[in-house]
Image (cartoon, rainbow, N blue to C red):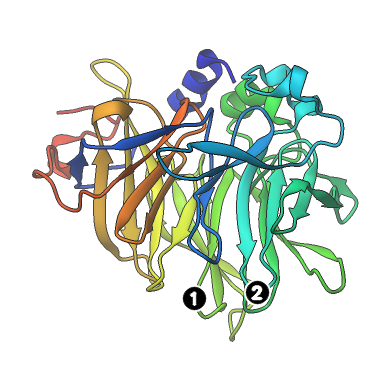
């Protein structure tokens, strides 16, 4: 993805404001465009999806990242390894969302070009499971999560009109054709749960499997879609946040949402951050990431084993920080006007 494409995508977002705290101290590990991060049943990893089509596993500072899996049956190491060329996506693959089924230890992959795939605990070439839903081919699979209790895989198609190579058009039109789907590993069926969505870039399943949260990147909203109970099959907005991307559930059942706040004046600038919410959408904690992230967009915030993990589709590394609460909120709602400018 070019810097221009990333900039176009960022500048297309309207604003929203959170009070938050700033984190500046990170440990980084090299990985090109680490969009999503997951840990296996043993707590090893994180595993991350990168721009050259592979899923890498981080094995600590002394070993670093090693190849674990890939989705493209036609990729070659000579052509693809370490590439950042988006034009090679249809050949090398571009995995985005990742999720483990902790009962089977299989890793499910949402690949922007090769569809829904899975790979066993030994890694290697992933098996393609689905490339379409209800007669409509996948164009740009993005977010993914597995409900290990039921085995159902939930995932998003960011657009049904454009592929990832056409990211500038998606941003320019604020494309409202995204959808949320489910895959049943027993019946092998893919069902469309919601459609006509503006940039469904993240999702997470609740701890009790009663609902999923869905982020709308171009809608600056979080939706709750009910899987069980009297509201089953319906969705409702529960929170407004700026430029939300991936959503990650904590072990306690709360959720971290990666956010990107655009301040338009005096000059456009992005503020990467994260918001922690409970099941009702009440904000529990919010952070911004300074230091090495500066004004770069992020795509994931995850809290795991006492640390924060941050991923970004646009940077050549992922990072972790053990900082919990640092500093004071450096601007408030009263300091922002309704054009996304500091007053």
Disc 1 is placed on an element classified as loop
Give 75 or 233, whichever is nearer the viewer. 75
In this image, 233 relative to 185: left or right?
left
On the image, the x and y values in percent for residue 49 come to 60, 40
Q: Residue at x 22, y 33 (%)?
A: 337
Counting other residues with Cα less than 10 Å from the Cα at mark 1, is it few (<14), some (14-19), or many (20 or more)? some
Give residue 186's mark. Answer: none
The spot of residue 129 in percent (x, y) is 84, 55
In this image, 96 relative to 317: left or right? right
Query: In the rendered image, which residue does mark 1 sit on?
Result: 207
Total tally of numbered discs in the picture: 2
Q: Quadrant of the C terminus?
A: top left
Residue sitting at x 67%, y 36%: 54
Q: Which residue is farthest right?
A: 135
Q: Position of residue 278 (x, y in %)?
A: 35, 69
Q: Is residue 237 above or below residue 286?
A: below
Earlier in the chain: of badge 2 and badge 1, it is 2
Q: Is residue 90 visible?
A: yes
Query: Is 289 displayed left or right of 58 in the figure?
Result: left
Residue 274 drawn at (x, y percent): 33, 47
Residue underneath mark 2: 103
Q: Is residue 200 left or right of residue 325?
A: right
Of the two numbered discs 2 and 1 in the rendering, the one whose residue sits closer to the viewer:
2
Q: Are marks 2 and 1 in contact (CB under 8 Å)?
A: no
Instruction: Rate crowding at label 2 as few (under 14), some (14 to 19) or many (20 or more) other CA atoms within 10 Å.
Output: few
CA–CA distance between discs 2 and 1?
Answer: 15 Å
């Amino acid at each position: 993805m070019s810097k221009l494409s990333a900039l176009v995508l960022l500048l297309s977002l309207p604003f929203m404001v959170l009070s938050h705290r700033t984190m500046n101290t990170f440990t980084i590990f090299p990985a090109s465009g680490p969009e999503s991060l997951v840990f296996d049943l043993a707590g090893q990893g994180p595993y991350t999806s990168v721009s050259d089509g592979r899923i890498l596993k981080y094995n600590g500072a002394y070993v670093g990242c090693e190849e674990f899996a890939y989705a493209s049956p036609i990729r070659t190491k000579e052509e693809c390894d370490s590439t950042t060329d988006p034009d090679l996506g249809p050949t090398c693959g571009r995995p985005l969302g990742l999720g483990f089924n902790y009962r089977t230890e299989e890793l499910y992959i949402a690949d922007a070009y090769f569809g829904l795939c899975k790979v066993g605990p030994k890694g290697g070439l992933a098996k393609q499971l689905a490339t379409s839903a209800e007669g409509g081919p996948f164009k740009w699979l993005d977010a993914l999560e597995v409900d290990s209790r039921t085995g159902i895989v939930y995932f998003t198609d960011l657009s049904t009109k454009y592929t990832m190579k056409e990211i500038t058009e998606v941003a320019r039109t604020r494309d409202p054709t995204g959808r949320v789907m489910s895959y049943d590993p027993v019946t092998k069926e893919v069902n469309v749960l919601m459609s006509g969505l503006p940039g469904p870039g993240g999702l997470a399943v609740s701890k009790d499997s009663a609902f999923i949260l869905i982020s709308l990147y171009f809608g600056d909203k979080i939706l709750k879609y009910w899987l069980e109970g009297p509201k089953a099959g319906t969705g409702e907005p529960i929170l407004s946040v700026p430029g939300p991307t991936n959503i990650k559930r904590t072990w306690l059942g709360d959720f971290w949402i990666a956010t990107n706040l655009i301040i338009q004046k005096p000059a456009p600038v992005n503020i990467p951050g994260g918001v922690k919410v409970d099941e009702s959408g009440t904000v529990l904690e919010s952070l911004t990431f300074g230091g090495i992230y500066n004004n770069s967009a992020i795509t994931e915030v995850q809290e795991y084993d006492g640390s924060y993990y941050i991923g970004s589709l646009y940077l050549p590394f992922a990072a972790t920080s053990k900082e919990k609460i640092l500093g004071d909120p450096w601007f408030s709602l009263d300091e922002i006007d309704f054009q996304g400018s500091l007053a």
